[in-house]
Image: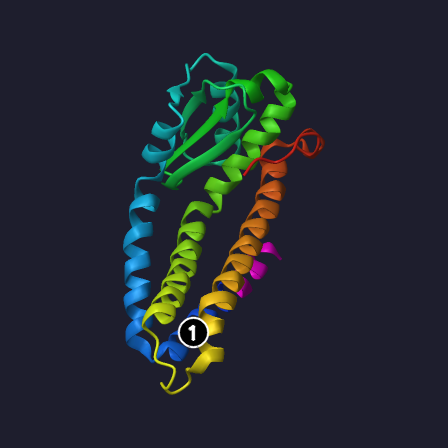
Amino acid sequence: MNIFKTGILLIALTALLMFIGNILGGEVGMAIALILAAIMNFGSYWFSDKIVLSMYRAQEASPNSELYQIVKQQTEKSGLPMPQVYTIPTDMPNAFATGRNPRHAAVAATDGIMRLLSRDELAGVIGHELAHIKYRDILISSIVATIAGAIMMIALFGGFGGDDDEDGGGIIGMLFLIIVAPIAAMIIQFAISRSREYAADRGGAEICGDPIALAKCASPA
């Protein structure tokens, strides 16, 4: 059901892109914005693991650590490739998965969340993050960000370069481009994100084998 919802929302986001592209004056502006957004998001998708891990000053976890052993146990159980495992030296409780695909993935957890949670609860959180990797949610979020970014660029171009007398334009069209379209894109983007989180909760419960432990702690993004 969550996969179906994600598909419907992606179609809605694409339809919004096509609609405002027509308001702007045709396919050229829409294509330019889509290409620019794709270029910007490709780098963040392809190098997502290096960018995020460097930003958080992540340190590679020891193979003897509890975190590494939990990840290893769950990847063997789920049939996923073993990701790189990192710890982040901060008291803020958080965990996340990154990487462009299951074979180029990383899982990281902060010192704060490892101190806060029991082993079973931490296993639930790691299961949630591994589900993100399994479902290729980094790719999905990159596609969504590209389309949403294109919509916002079209709105910006339309606001500064639009002609009120163009076919399909006018003041109402410009107001839609500048105000309504970016808001609608952000709402759909948020809905897709929540849909992927729910799917990761379900997948994480299956991976860790203990839904109660996962339910005891707030699911990280």
Residue farthest to the top?
A: 64
Q: Is residue 15 visible?
A: no
Residue closest to the eye, 68 or 48:
48
Residue 92's place in the image compared with 103, above or below, is above
Q: Quadrant for the C terminus, please.
A: top right
Helix, strand or loop status at disc 1? helix
Q: Position of residue 91 (x, y in %)?
A: 54, 19
Left or right of 124, for residue 156: left
Residue 217 percent across, percent down from the top left: 67, 30
- The residue wearing badge 1 is 20
Vertical side of 178 occupied by 79: above or below:
above
Residue 28 vs residue 192, the one in the foreground: 28
| The N terminus lies in quadrant | bottom right
Residue 187 visible somewhere in the drawing: yes
> Is 201 drawn above or below residue 1 in the view shown?
above
Residue at the spot 41% in from the left edge and 64% down from the top edge: 151
Q: Which residues are magenta?
A: 1-9
Mark 1 crowd level (few <14, some 14–19, many ≥20, 10 Å Cα): many
Q: Is residue 220 magenta?
A: no
Report x, y in % for residue 170: 43, 82
- The residue at the point 42 percent across, 15 percent down is 63
Query: In the shown orientation, is residue 33 left or right of residue 1?
Result: left
